[in-house]
């Protein structure tokens, strides 16, 4: 029940933003993109939204919506896409990631072979984040535009 209330609250905040549908959708997409990237998130989304001159509140909402939990869900997809884009085999990258997680230590991070893992993983997260951002832009633009048309139509 709390999750349903959270999503309803996000929806009401997004459609209630007094900005153009493009800026609202753009802000939300920036938030989704940075929310999926490990190490970034809602606050980084607000900064980038400010730089890109899109809606900061929508960026914050998109970042909150996708931050961390979606990164975990997107991890396997990021490995496969990142391995494909960097020309490595996804099983090798997956095995290295599992090994790093299982045997995590600061020494493992200092090891040069571990850093080879981060390239396909981060490329994959960037690709997944970009795809999610593009889809979310379209959805939010559509929702805000339709809501505003209906609201204008009802107030005449």
Image (tube, grey):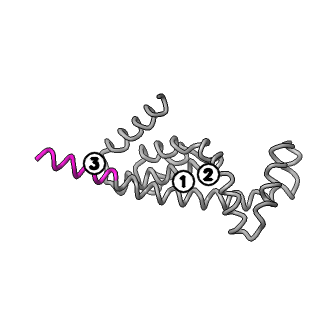
Residue visible at 48% across and 46% down?
A: 62
Q: Is residue 9 above or below residue 138?
A: above
Whether 118 is drawn above or below 85: the answer is above
Q: Counting residues from the N terminus, which is met first, the one under dot 3 or under dot 1?
A: 1
* Residue 155 located left or right of residue 111: left
Q: Is residue 50 among the parts visible in the rendering?
A: no
Residue 33 disc label: 1
Where is residue 64 drawn, in percent x and y?
52, 41
Q: What is the CA distance from the residue labelled 3 to the residue labelled 1?
A: 24 Å
Task: Tell me: 114 left or right of 150.
Answer: right
Give coordinates of residue 88: x percent, y percent. 77, 67
Which tag, 2 or 3, sits closer to the chain's start? Answer: 2
Judge depth for marks 2 and 3 and give the one in front. 3
| Residues tagged 1 and 2 counted as in contact (Cβ below 8 A) | yes
Start and end of the magenta stretch? 143-156
Q: Going 29% across and 54% down the picture, which residue do you hit?
A: 145
The residue closer to the viewer here, 109 or 2, is: 2
Residue carrying label 3:
147
- Labels 3, 1: front one: 3
Q: Residue at x 79, y 52 (%)?
A: 97
Q: Is residue 111 magenta?
A: no
For the residues marked 2 and 3, what is the alpha-carbon distance in whole angstroms? 30 Å
The residue indicated by pointer 2 is 37
Return the residue nearer the eye: 35 or 80.
80
């Amino acid at each position: 029940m709390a999750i349903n209330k959270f999503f309803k609250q996000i929806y009401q905040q997004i459609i209630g933003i007094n900005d153009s549908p493009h800026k609202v959708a753009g802000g939300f997409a920036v938030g989704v993109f940075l929310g999926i990237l490990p190490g970034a998130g809602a606050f980084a989304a607000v900064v980038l939204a400010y730089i890109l001159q899109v809606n900061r509140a929508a960026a914050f909402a998109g970042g909150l919506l996708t931050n961390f939990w979606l990164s975990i869900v997107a991890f396997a997809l990021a490995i496969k896409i990142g391995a494909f884009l960097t020309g490595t085999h996804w099983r090798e990258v997956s095995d290295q990631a599992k090994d790093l997680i299982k045997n995590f230590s600061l020494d493992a991070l200092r090891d040069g072979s571990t850093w080879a893992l981060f390239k396909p993983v981060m490329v994959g997260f960037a690709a997944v984040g970009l795809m999610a951002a593009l889809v979310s832009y379209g959805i939010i633009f559509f929702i805000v535009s339709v809501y505003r048309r209906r609201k204008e139509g009802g107030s005449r």
